[in-house]
Amino acid sequence: MNKKKLQSEQTKKKVADAARALFIQKGYKATSIEDIVKATGCSAGNIYYHFQSKEGLFLYLIEEWNREWEETWVRQEPIYTTTIDKLRGLGEHLAHDQLNHPLTKAADEFFNNAEKASAAEERMTEMVNGYLDFNRQLLQQGVERGEFEQKDTASLAIILDSLLVGLSQHSRKLTIDETLALYRLAMDVFLYGIVRAPG
């Protein structure tokens, strides 16, 4: 990597790190580009060069969070022997991540903000499609192993994502034990339903 590119990457990291700290401390809406300029000593133009907008900067941080989550999951996934165990493990992994990640509150604020540029909406759609694809592949794996009935895994992936997104919202004020219990119950309901077996 040449010197100019290295300096550019270092500036990008400096801005991202400072912005992350500000978003954690102040929240998404209350953090301005001016705040990030003051924290980094970089010009607003430099920040826009690397991230295009405050939204772009925040989405970059969310994408970093997604990469970290994926890396952790890839290390953890082999401990589960069945797809059913993987789904339960996934629920627990998400519960811990959502409760413990410092950007959770700012992310809630960001995603609930109706005013987003079309470029941000497109990146968010790509992210959601990535989550759905992850779910679909996991469910398809269960079908191929004979653990699940042959069903429309694309539709089931949407249902699973909706369940997990809803759980993340409803568990914000719960303790970790209450949250884990809720995610475990949700996975059991997703896997087995709530209808009593006949007889």
Image: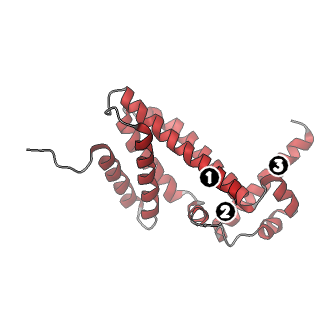
The residue singled out by tag 3 in the image is 10
Q: Is residue 139 left or right of residue 132?
A: left
The residue singled out by tag 2 in the image is 116
Element on which disc 3 rests: helix
Contact, mark 3 vs mark 2 (Cβ under 8 Å):
no
Q: Is residue 75 left or right of residue 179?
A: right
Q: Identify which residue is drawn at 61% across, 66% down.
A: 114
Spot occupied by residue 184 in the image (x, y as percentages of width and height): 34, 50
Residue situated furthest left in the rendering: 199
Q: Nearer the viewer, residue 165 or 100?
A: 165
The residue singled out by tag 1 in the image is 124
Contact, mark 2 vs mark 1 (Cβ under 8 Å):
yes
Mark 3 or 2, closer to the camera: 2
Spot occupied by residue 116 in the image (x, y as percentages of width and height): 66, 62
- Whether 141 is drawn above or below 195: the answer is above
Residue 170 visible at all: yes
Quarter occupied by the N terminus: top right
